[in-house]
Structure formats: C-alpha cells, structure tokens
Amino acid sequence: MKQSVTTSQWNSILFTISLVVILLGGCGESDAPESNELRIGALVPHTGIAASVGPEVMRGIEYVLKEAGYAVDGVAVVLIDEDEGDNPANAVMRVRKLVEEDGVDVVIGPMLAHTSAAVAPYLQSQGVPHLPWGMADSSSSPHSVYTAGTGKGNGHVAGEFAATELAAKKAAILVMDYALGHQMRDGFRDGFEASGGSVVSTQLLPLGASDLAPYFEGIGEADVLAVLMVNPTDFAFVRQYHEFGLTQPVVFISAQPQEEPLLTQMGEDVVGMYGVTMYAPAIDTAENQAFVKRFREHFDRDPGIATVHAGVWTTAMVLEAARESGSTDRRALSAALQGISGFDTPAGALSITADRMGVHDVFAFRAEAHQDGVRWNVVKRYPAVKPAY
Amino acid sequence: MEDILRYLLSGLSYGMLLFLIACGLSLILGVMGILNLAHGSLYMIGAYVGLSLVQQWEVPWLLALLAAGAVAALVGLIMERLLLRRLHRSYNQQVLLTLGLVYIFGNAALWIWGSFPLSGKPPAFLSGSINLGRYDFPVYRLALLVFGSAVAAGLVWLQNGTRAGAIVRAGMHDRDMVLALGINYPLVCSAVFLLGAFLAGLAGLIGAPLLGANWNMAFPVLLSAMIVVVIGGLGRIEGTLLGALLIGLFDTLGRIFFPDLAMFTIYAVFVAVLLWRPAGLLGRVAIEDASPPVGLRIAPATSRSKSAMRRYAFVAAPAIALFLAPWFVSGHLLNMLTEICIFGVFALSHNVLFGQTGLFSLGHAAFFGMGAYLAGSLMVHQGVTNFWLMAWILVPVIAAFAALAGLVALRTRGVYFLFVTLAIGELLTSVALKWVSVTGGSNGLYGIPYPDVGFAAPGAFSFYFLVLGILGFTAFVLHRLSRSPLGMALQGIRDNERRMQHLGYDTQAVKLLAFVIAGVFAGIAGALYASYSTTVVPSYLGAMMSTLVMLMVILGGAQHFHGPLLGAALIIWLRFAVGSTVPAWWDMILGTVFVLTVWWLPGGLASLESRFRRSPR
C-alpha cells in the first residue's frame, strides 16, 4: 500500500514536471542574434481574415532583400517572419518573441489597424521602430512610421477626383463599417464638398455583407457612387450594381483591397469603374516598368498594391535608414526612418512628415480590360499627397 | 408601389436563398438529431467545386450544379459514416467534432483555391433584369424564388407524402420503436444526411452569384442557417421555410428603413421568437441532449481517494514551478505562461457550467469579452487603473448581466440552449461593433496598460503574479464550490435534473447561480486579457472564443478539476509552437485536435494521467 502511494506521488509530480518541460522546451529558441547584423522582423497575417495579404507583403520584402543580396553596406540582413493573425493578443505575443528572442532591430508590420495598435505600446517601451500598414492613430508609438499616412488623405483625393474629373455634383457614399471605412468616408466627403459637390447619402455596410439590394435603395439621386469595399463584398457589389440597373459612375475611394487578380476575377462587371490608391503595375514610368520586369523575373507575377507598398517600400526604407545611420541600433534606425525625404520609389518620391506619416503620390485609376485580364490604368496622378486628419 | 414590390421581392429572394442553405441543416438536425456545424463547409465545398467546374472547365451550369451537390453529398456521407454515426444526440461531441471539420475544410480550401475569393455569375439563361420602378430587378433572384419553392414543395412531399417520410417522422419521435419494427433506420439516416449534404452543395453554387466562394465563409453561412432553423422550429421543412422568409424580409427591410439597427434585427427576432415559442414557430419536437456531456461519464471520485500528501504534491509542484518561472524564462515565455494562466481562469469558469452543471454553452465568451471591455473602458476612458477597484465595479456588473442572460437562456434546453447562448454572444459582438464611442467599433479599444496591482509597479512581472494569484484564487474557490452542497446540487442537475426537482430543488435557480458564478470568473479572466493583449476587439465576445475555451475544457478533461488547466496550457502552447513554425497550418492543426479529442480522448488529457496511474505495473 505504502509502495503504491509513493509511486502515485512520483507519477503525479513527474507528469506535471514533464508537461511544464514540454511546454517550455517546445517553444523553440531562435539563433542568438549577432551584433553585426541587421535583423528585420516581419509581422504579417498568414492566418485569419487577411491571410491573403501576408504572402503578398512577404514577396515585396524578399524582393528588396534579394536585390540587395541580403546585405546593406557589408552588414548581413536577416529576415524573421511571424504570423500576425487577426488577433491582437497573438500579435503582442509574436512581437515579443521577435524582439526578445530574435533580437530584431526593426519590425515591418503589422498590416491590420487593431493589431498595429496592440503592438505599438510594447514596441515603444523597447524603442523598436516599426512600419505598420494600418492607419495612423494617436496611440501609436513615437517609433511608428506610417508610410500610408491616413485613410482620410486618400479619401480626400477620391472626393476631389469625383467632383472635378467626373464632374459629379451629388455623391452617395457606401463604405464598410470599420475604422478605415469611416476615415475614407470623412476624407471623401471633405474632398468632394471642397470641390463643389454635396453628399446626398452615406451608408455603412457590415463587414461580410453580400446582399447589396437594401443599400441600393438608399442611394437617392446621386450622380456618383463612392464606395469602400473589402472582399468578398466588392464582388457582390460589382455584380449587383449591373443587375439592379445602376448607372452612376463608381469610384472605389481606396482600391487597396481590389488587387488586379481580383479585378480579373470580377471580369467585365468592374470594367469602367474608378479606383484611387498608391500603386498599380501600369504606372507608366521607366522606373516602374523596370521594377515590374525585375519583379516578374523573381516571382513570375506582377507586384500588387500590398506587395509594393507594405513590402517593397518599407524594406527599401529600412535599408536606406541603415545606410544613412551607418548603424543597426534601434534608436538610430528610428531617427533615420523618420528623417527620410524624397526617397525614390517606383511610384514616385516618398517623404516622412514630422508626425511620421508618408507623403507620396496618389493615383486615380480606371479598370480596363486587357488581353490577360482586367487592369488598373492611370487616369490622373496627384503628386505628394499629404496626410489629412 | 413598384418600389414596395421590389423591397418585398428582395427580402423574399434573400430569404429563399437562406432556405436553400438551411434546409439541409434542418433535415439533418430535425431528423437525425445531428448538429452538423460543418454544414457551412459543405456549402463552401459546393460553391468552390461548382464555380471551378463552370469557370475553369467550362462545364454547363446545370451539370456543374449537380456535380457540386454530388461532391458535397459524398463528403457528407463520409463524415456521417466515419465520424458522426456514433455520436447520436450527443450535441457537445457533435459540435466539437464538426467545428473541427470547419477548421480543417477551411484550411484545405485555402490551400487548394487560394486566399482570393471566387465570384459566381448566374447562368446565361437566367441572367438579365426586368424593370421594376426606380431600379431593375435581376431575373436570377426571381428564379431563386421559384427554385426554392420547388425544393420546399419536394421536401414537404417527401416528408409528409411518402413511406420514407413516414419512417423519418416516426424515427424522430421514437427511434427505438422504428428499429424494433425491423426498419433499417441507420440506412434511412444515411440517406437523409446524404440529401442534406447534397442540398448544401446545390445551395453553394446557387448562392455563388450573391455570396461567391471563399475559404472563410463556412461559419457566417452556418450562423444564418442555424438562426433560420431554430426560428422555424426543428423537424419541419415548413418551419424552416417560414423562418427563412421571415429573416430574409426582416433583414432586408431593416437595412432599408432602420440601417443603424440592421445588425441587431436578426438577433432581436431570434431571441423574441424563442422567448415566445421556445421550440420555434412551427417546431413540434423539443430535442434534448440524450447523453451527459462528453467526458462526464466517469464520476469524479478518484481525487477523493488521494492521500493528503499526494494532493499537496500534485498542487505544489506546478504552483512552485509557475511561481519561480519568471526568474528562469525569457519575457516571451513569461508572456506565454501569463496567457496560459488567464485562459486557465476562463476554462475553469466554463467548467462550472459544462463539467459540473452539464450546460453546454456556446456563448461563454460573452462574459469574457464583457469583462475585457469593461476593464479596457475603465482604464482607457475613465483612467481607473487600480485592479482591485476595477474588480469591485466589474463583478456586480458582470453578475447582473449573467443573471439576465441566464434568465433568457435557461428558458430553453438542449440544442436550443446552445443556440440561444450562441446568439447572446453574437448579439454582444454586434453591439461592440456598432457602439463605437465606447467600444472603438471594429478597431476595438487599444492602448490598455497593465493594471496597478498595489504590491509592485505595473509591468509584465507584477502582472504575471497578479494573474497567477487570481488563477490560484479561482481554483481554490471553484474547487471548494465543487465540494459544497451547491456543487453537489449542480452535479445532481447534470446527472438527472428531473430527480433533483423531485427532491425539491429549484433547479432553475441553481442553474442560474451557476451561470452567474461562471460569468463572473470569465469576466475577471477577460479583464486580465484586456491588459495582456493591450487591446479588446469584438471577436473576444464571439462564438470562436467560446468554442476555443470549450475545446480547452474537453481536451484537458471536464471530469477532472485540473483538466481545463491542462487543456488551456496545451492549446496556448500549441499556438505558440505552430505560429512560429508553420502558421499556415494552424487551422488544420486546431481542427485536427478538435476531431481527435472527440474521437480518441473523450475523457481528456487528465484521463490519460489517470489511466497511466491505474495501469498494472
């Protein structure tokens, strides 16, 4: 009896200790960071609602690093990729791993607004610069550099474009009901009204909405339709727009979610609609065409908006900051990133303002049918668009 | 007039699409008592297969429609034969297993078809529109009305006008009697499952012009279908049709006339109907879970026989390890241990409902998320950072809400209870999305600091000890509860509620008390999680969070007090390990854990330990 009790005690203790050892040991330690390396952490979504964005961004990052031979001024560059998911707690966990175990000097990402807001306080406490793609916000770290600026700036351009280039007087706004949608709505309204137009209706769509019929009823007497839609609602919208016999011109206030492979999926339904954003492969400059050609050689596909903006620009800026500061020190990198001005990108010059926002060109595009699918073609270029608040 | 006709047609056609999606689920649940949460996945498979055939192989639309149905039916048949057959009327196991399949199918679809959604077009012979007032109206939507009506008529005839239907109806009421009459009822059940899955596949391609196809669509599709089925009432196709048309009309008209309230319309109708008629509008069978929850068939008597020394060793070893951990592990691992402890509190609270009382809730995250929002709001908006002050505010608020939610949910039983708790969580999610000034909307509340704990400066280190202390306190209180007269009453209700009523217990009041206790501890866990993640987002309130904690409880072992802690530790660790190595496999791995737990480890990890201890030496 005594023997069996003793054995049971040992079993319990051993079971518990084994579990703790397995749990702690299974997390995996990364290679110890070398001091003479530039370590870049990429925090992008590979799972969750934005899982399609992660691989796109990673291609952009890898493109720049391949072109640079994974080195900058003789210093080796190491890239560590972590999944942002769409859960703030997960993003915090991952970013701590990047900083504390992988010893990264800079973080590219996250891509979503709420995960970006979640990791900012921690990165601030560690003095790690980061380049999120999500919208700017007052809670961000002083080391956050928002290359995209604010959604309102893009929306302002879309409003101006609709009023001046499409000669619209009355606009109906139809945007997804989330933070970026609200920013775009406000920006469009300001830009449109500043250019002489008036907004006759504004409707917010829940994320995931698929039946647009009820919202068409609320459009009123508008002569232009300004929309911000994410997948799969944009698919439903372009189809139902035709089915219900709508005729007003459509402007995607931000065409970021409408990458060209998706336009091709939408087919003829989307042809003739307009979109405002920062990049498309069709931008007709020698620099961009050379970039597209080189990118195709690496990845056998065209670069998309997320690839270029969240991957290529940010990584190129990090290498430039490392070159400029001559250091991989986090604070030196942060200062150099914030001092970037007139930085050449395939879509024009990029500068960072004193409040860490990107100033860059914005383009109005028109969806047009081509031999290999539907593409965004440039209609008008708006140089050096400042972020609006 | 034409405008009103267009509104009505829009609502009815959307409702008919909901009917086509839901009728298979209704058949399978009503007839077989199988709650197939992977019904949305069968719909997704039908949509992908149909669209691929039409767009890539240029197969005629009608042929692709049949193929979409056939592939979904085949997948459904395999599910029924291999996995679901032995889980008759055991909803907790069915939910866990089929939810696992949702993750697996979703991840597989992501690999096969990629992350970009596919868009569907109506076939050429149904494209075009007719003019109806200010706008046109698509012919395809009119065809949906006709096709849906034909399917409904066919199913009603099958159910009420054929011998097979008579067998099915008889089996719904008394399965054993049908078997005793020599009828091959399992074969009938397989045929019904096949038909339900076939209809889901058909609906996939038919619905593609509206919903498209994407790897992440299964759960939203399922949610719509479940609401329709429950509102209509289980066991009657007419009920499903009525429920679908009502929801279609309410949803469409709500979005036209009350756009700001549109997100709540469906849930408001849902809760109102169930309060008025708990078995749905036309429901005629009140299906209840016929078996105790998974993992609860072993009486929790083993720990009673443990010697005091052994019990102390069992508690002291991990407690000492956890207490000393901050001095030996990196900040990243400390972070993981903090999350494990928070989910430990959450899982222990869930087990008060599930393991002790036998209540299978899919809305427990509502309390967790509410605690997170309350704490986040107090810290961000009111500047209250003292944890103990927050706890004084949070506990009564969560308790009051839990009592209210319990009063509503406990009016229902079995699968209806499951649906109502699910709806409460989703309703709160909608509120969080719309109430932007307080909750931050879809972006959530962010910039939430570590709380002031009083004994040390706020930071990761002191926060860890706060979390560890609260885990210890929760474990102590809930363990005492399980051995108290109240705990015994809860277990009595779990094992045989009717007997407890005959013994004079007010079982509703006892269950309500359990609801409140579980809700309060979940709320405290949520408050801690707000500081841990620095952000609170609407998904903290929703069904996915509820199912995750449910998995932790069952994986760890609901019949053992420490089981939920083991489950929480394993799932959080798994997420750490997988996330750093093969993140794109996470859904597949999580889904597999769901399935394997039901299949091979219904007693949970803790039962492995017992088995190991009991094995002959």
Image (cartoon, coloured by chain):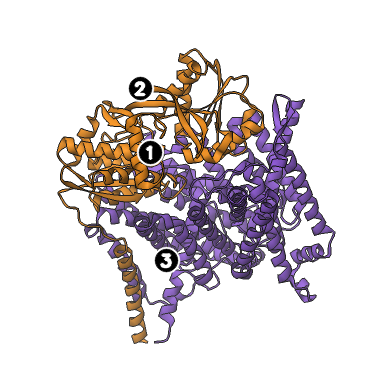
Chain colours: A orange, B purple
Depth check: give the residue in front, A164 or B35. A164
Residue A211 lies, with reference to residue B134, above or below; the image says below
User: Which residue position holds label 1?
Assistant: B446
User: Which residue position holds label 3?
Assistant: B562
Q: Secondary structure at mark 3?
A: loop
Tell me the chain of label 1.
Answer: B
Q: Looking at the image, do the residues carrying marks 1 and 2 touch, with CB atoms under 8 Å apart?
A: no
**Dot label at residue B163:** none
Image x and y of residue B268, in percent: 63, 40
Name the residue at the right extreme: B161
Asked whether, in this view, residue B165 is left or right of residue B58, the answer is right
Q: Residues within 10 Å of mark 1 (few under 14, many from 20)?
A: many
Q: Amino acid at mark 1?
A: Tyr
Mark nearer the viewer, 2 or 3: 2
Q: Amino acid at mark 2?
A: Pro
Q: Secondary structure at mark 2?
A: strand
Residue B245 lies, with reference to residue B597, above or below; the image says above
Asked whether, in this view, residue B84 is left or right of residue B429, the answer is right
Q: Which of the two labelled residues, at mark 1 and mark 3, occupies the earlier sequence position?
A: 1
Depth check: give the residue in front, A200 or B269. A200
Image x and y of residue A255, in percent: 46, 32
Q: Do callouts 1 and 3 point to residues on the same chain?
A: yes
Q: Residues within 10 Å of mark 2 (few under 14, many from 20)?
A: some
Quarter where residue B472 is shown: bottom left
Quarter where residue B94 is shown: bottom right
Asked whether, in this view, residue B539 is left or right of residue B448, the answer is right
Depth check: give the residue in front, A206 or B50. B50
**Dot label at residue A383:** 2
Mark nearer the viewer, 1 or 3: 1
